[in-house]
Image (cartoon, helix red, strand yellow):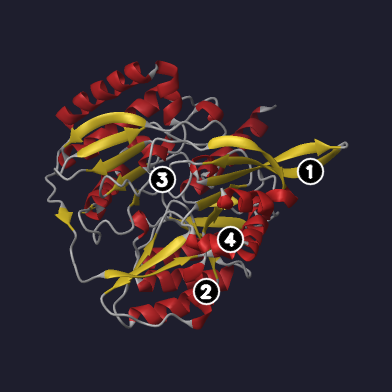
Amino acid sequence: MNTKTHENSSVESGLQKCSKLFGVYPQKQDGVFMQRIKILGGRLNWNQWRKISCLTEKYSQGYPLHLTTRQDIELHNLSIENIPDIQKALAEVGLTTFGAGGDSVRNITVCSACDLCKDAIDLLPLAQYVQQYLEQQPVILNLPRKFKISFSGCEKACAKPWLSDLGFIAKQNGLFDIIGAGSLGVKPKLGILLCENLPPAEIPSSCVAAINLFNKYGDYTNRHRARFRHIRVKLGDNKFKEELHSYFNRTKKTQCQPQFQLRSTSNKKIRQLYRLQLPNGDINPQKAIELADSAERVGAILRINLEHGIEIYGEQDFQLPESLAGFTSNPIIVACPGSTTCPRALVNCHAIADKIRKELPELSLSNLRINISGCPNNCAQSAIADIGLIGTLRKEKGQQKRCFRLFIDGGNGRKNKLSEPLNVVRDKDVIETVKKLLNR
């Protein structure tokens, strides 16, 4: 490679890293892109929701608005020339795409109703402070890989800390336990208990310490071994915790420790009015606008949860638009886009999810989580699900057939429990297999 070619390659690589840092990714189809929008804790107002819906309708070429399992929103099928206008429009309503992708601190997830649930603590102000605090640290612009943080408002751990690089769990005594160094991917490994009874004022320093440790020991040459948990595997659990505590003690001496007044539930009259389970995390932008028009009139609150759902809270009942009423009885199925848009996917997850919803309506009464991932990267968190399916290919009579690796009985990220692998099922046998598991 000559010098000029090498320089061009370096510039192209730098541009790709920069675009991903702002949540822009190429899709499987040539010439179209996905824009991810960071929604801290899944909290956004109706004006922001309406703006995203309008942008989806204008620019996404018929593709619906999509909710992720980390409380983000994605717009798909975008032309690259429209992305600057989209990002500008988002900024005008107080939304950001910075850190929505790339090798940085990703969207911080928070229990969708920790400010409303009995015995929980409102952690959104703390999460907001941590996000702002970390965005001032230059090191987050070029980490070895992505870094994920979650906040759970009580020991039910609804924000799935066992999947996080750092997962903070609030306790009744006002202190926090930290679960960390977990992730899924091809070879899932849940987190471990890193610290007990941490005061809230020390949480920002603990985040900086972990990120600095990640920056020093993380593998910048092999992306398959570059997550935070790979440092733990390399050092061993005890040595890893010793190093982390050493970094933490040094960081505390140099970092300002803010004083937080954590709040318990803020309004006892507010209750959950609806939970809408969106098929495949998708909602037509016109339906999204209809929801805003109906809910905003009565002062209802919108939250995005971590399972492709929307939760509506308020004091006053209201009638859902007829076009959305069916979403309240959908089963909890989390499916990544699969081969519809992802270059790495082996199967069409949405097609299987749609088939399960149609042929097994009794699932809506089971409260089971079914998670469907299009490839071994495990993006739909199949390896911690009640019933998990991960796309794969198997040869039959010399031909490649679409199949799924089957997993059952996981802790859904709220407990220290991976799903147990069972067997491989063919695409056409998924419905019958799920039906047998339900009966069992």
Q: Secondary structure at mark 2?
A: helix
Ranked by sequence position, the earlier of labels 4 and 2 is: 4
Determine whether 42 is above or below 185 in the image. below
Q: Secondary structure at mark 4?
A: strand
Q: Which residue is mark 2?
A: 326
Mark 1 or mark 3, whichever is nearer to me: 1
Q: Which residue is mark 4?
A: 76
Q: Residues within 10 Å of mark 2 (few under 14, many from 20)?
A: few
Q: Which residue is mark 3?
A: 106
Q: Quadrant of residue 234?
A: top left
Determine whether 349 is above or below 184 in the image. below
- Residue drawn 49% across the image and 26% down it: 220
Ranked by sequence position, the earlier of labels 3 and 2 is: 3
Q: Quadrant of residue 208?
A: top left
- Residue drawn 36% across the image and 20% down it: 237
Front-lying residue, 119 or 435? 435
Residue type at mark 3: give it. Arg
Residue 144 % position (x, y): 46, 31
Residue type at mark 1: give it. Lys
Q: Quadrant of residue 77?
A: bottom right
Residue 310 % position (x, y): 42, 65
Q: Residues within 10 Å of mark 1 (few under 14, many from 20)?
A: some
Cα separation, mark 1 vs mark 2, equals 34 Å
Q: Residues within 10 Å of mark 3 (few under 14, many from 20)?
A: many
Residue type at mark 4: give it. His
Residue type at mark 2: give it. Gly
Residue 156 % position (x, y): 30, 47
- Counting every numbered tag in the picture gives 4
Ranked by sequence position, the earlier of labels 3 and 4 is: 4
Q: Which residue is mark 1?
A: 401
Determine whether 165 is above or below 259 in the image. above
